[in-house]
Image (tube, coloured by chain):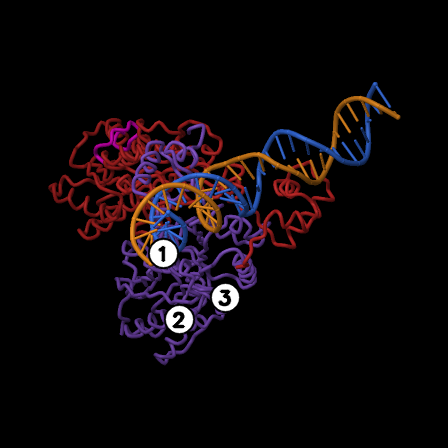
Chain colours: A purple, B red, C orange, D blue
Amino acid sequence: MSSENITIYDIASDAGVSIATVSRVLRGEANVSEATRKKVLEVIDRRNYRPSSIARGMASKTTHSLGIVLPKLLNPHYAMIFTGAQEEARKLGYTMSLFPWSSLDTREYNPAAMLAERRLDGLIVCVEYLPHDHDVQVLAALRDLRQYMPVVLIGCVPPSYDFPAVTNNSASMLQAIVRYLTELGHERIAFIGGVEEDNDPLRRDVGYENGLRDARLPYIASYRIYCRGTAEDGAAALNRMLDSLKPEYWPTAVIALNDLVAMGCMAEAGRRGIAIPDRLSVVGCDNLFCAPYLTPPLTSVNTHQQQTGARAVQLLISGEDKQETAGWDLVERASCARVRP
Amino acid sequence: MSSENITIYDIASDAGVSIATVSRVLRGEANVSEATRKKVLEVIDRRNYRPSSIARGMASKTTHSLGIVLPKLLNPHYAMIFTGAQEEARKLGYTMSLFPWSSLDTREYNPAAMLAERRLDGLIVCVEYLPHDHDVQVLAALRDLRQYMPVVLIGCVPPSYDFPAVTNNSASMLQAIVRYLTELGHERIAFIGGVEEDNDPLRRDVGYENGLRDARLPYIASYRIYCRGTAEDGAAALNRMLDSLKPEYWPTAVIALNDLVAMGCMAEAGRRGIAIPDRLSVVGCDNLFCAPYLTPPLTSVNTHQQQTGARAVQLLISGEDKQETAGWDLVERASCARVRP
DNA sequence: TTTTATACTGTAAGCGCTATCATAACAGCG
DNA sequence: CGCTGTTATGATAGCGCTTACAGTATAAAA
């Protein structure tokens, strides 16, 4: 590291102009003569000068940096959202910082202080299903943050969150998955994952129930198991469900909250010697990179995460205060089969 | 958003003290009377004041923010490294920003400008295997960056990179894997992935060859296929290798550069009806979350990515200029078997 | 009582930019 | 030739903090 940072003053004196002029060429303003511009650029290049974004932020009150908080990066689903958001931010001339979910955790000393202090130009928050009590605290943290910067949400956003957002219409998605399975002849369709307390009309549960109703199938509580979103949770959930039912009532198809849960279900089925898809069809969600490499390859829903992230950035920058719904499509692979007659 | 940002002056005048005193309680300096401290904190809390990290950075010439550049976040391997680094940074009072690999790309207008302008307190760079010509440019970009901030590297760092680093001693790792397989009776062991030009003594190739030598097995060029690090690359590579050999010379074991390549190999083997592990053992690397959920569960090397990330942050903050080697351990699962007699 | 150390607190000079306003130079016009 | 309008440039006031440095009490020492 060089001992002394070179500043706009160094460039100005080297080029024999004022700092205002250097600033003008730096920002690409029009009213600079071609001769001076060339001279200044030459000096900048020769001295290897990099204007300080800190000082610029100080003076212009805008940092050209956005933030995103994700529940967990280790789930590739969120990594995809981040990647999409980051690329879009880059295109628009912004950088993107990633913050862990704990940044919003009100149980820590000062939930949003760090984020607020950063003076970001905007923040994207991916919301997950959360236990309701915690939810309220997160909402409070979000409202707090909103005093300092615009906030856009991504995910299954409940109506109580009056924020601009890119939501996934999980209801219509689930409804379509149920239809897909009933068309394959399934009548005992389980749904694993999610949080019970949530009563968002966009929620998967609503779509699940609508789907069953469409096919004139009964809603059976034993087929609806709530759990968190990891593979272990999925395996445990399926285990609980199967234990609680006589084998002749076992579901012929399972819809999983996400691919991780689906992986857990497949592992648990394997452990019990239940063949997939012959005796149990499985549908996941998120279409993770490993879905095609499972045995059998997992049918999943591509939720266009990168696009979702990119769109959230656009909403943030443009300042549009609206909620959009992300698209999705079912990727059929070998984990679902027509039910045995 | 509130229209006016409240500043240290607002707090000072509200509390009836000078801004210097507010600054003192903000930074937890000792020489402030308990009464004043309490009064100031009360005002800060009531006005919901958040000191600007921008202004603080301007005045103190330190931003308490680190950066990390990753080849690609979608590979969970890097997501793990990031997570470990971020958590450690947080513990030490720093935030961590993530930058895409393209930030170092010299083919873009100004490779490291964005990073340099950010005035980060330090930067971690994860280096991947790279084609050599590009490598040199990256090295140049890194040296350039180093003028502005300390840089720590993570990965398989060639000796030509005289940077502090957390390296993975891939040679000893590969050697151990080969030993593991030869102890299972394997004599035809293939190794898939990596870049040919690289001649780092820590490199996997060296370990692979040493391992073979230890077991008095010949090095057979056909068993060494180079490819990039995705599942598709792995599948194509195995495909090429098998096509080029008579079935009686097919390897009985494959070591893959990483779990993605291993997944590709497993898929390709499946396509050809080659049973794993009966006719082909497979070893991966990185121990991705999905490794236990493959069929069969994939034997892989846990490279302690989170620890690696955390350690890199420690080196960065402490300023120690040394290279450390990350630990690893083999996680045995069902994708490897004793070779048929 | 005066001197001197001690504990607080205030004043003010930056940090490196942006952005406003003022100024200078020079053209075109009546 | 004086006037206005246009274009290029400079001077300078912040932006919201940190950090010497300079006080001003008050207590301890002489």
Q: Which element type, helix, strand or loop, lies under badge 2?
A: helix
Q: Are marks 3 and 1 on the same chain?
A: yes
Magenta span: B195-206
Q: Nearer the viewer, residue D11 or B123?
A: D11
- Say above or below: B228 vs A171: above
Residues flagged by tags 2 and 1 on a common chain: yes
> How far apart are the two marked residues, 2 and 1, measured between alpha carbons?
27 Å
Q: How far across and down, in percent of the image, does residue B289 sit?
A: 37, 49
Residue designated by label 3: A161
Residue to which mark 1 is pinned: A267
Tell me whether the residue at label 3 lies in contact with that at label 1, contact meaning CB atoms closer than 8 angstroms: no
Mark 2 lies on residue: A171
Q: Chain of mark 1?
A: A
What label sits on residue A174 in the rendered view? none
Q: Can you tell which of label 3 and label 1 is closer to the viewer?
A: 3
Discs 3 and 2 carry the same chain letter: yes
Q: Amino acid at mark 2?
A: Ala
Q: Chain of mark 3?
A: A
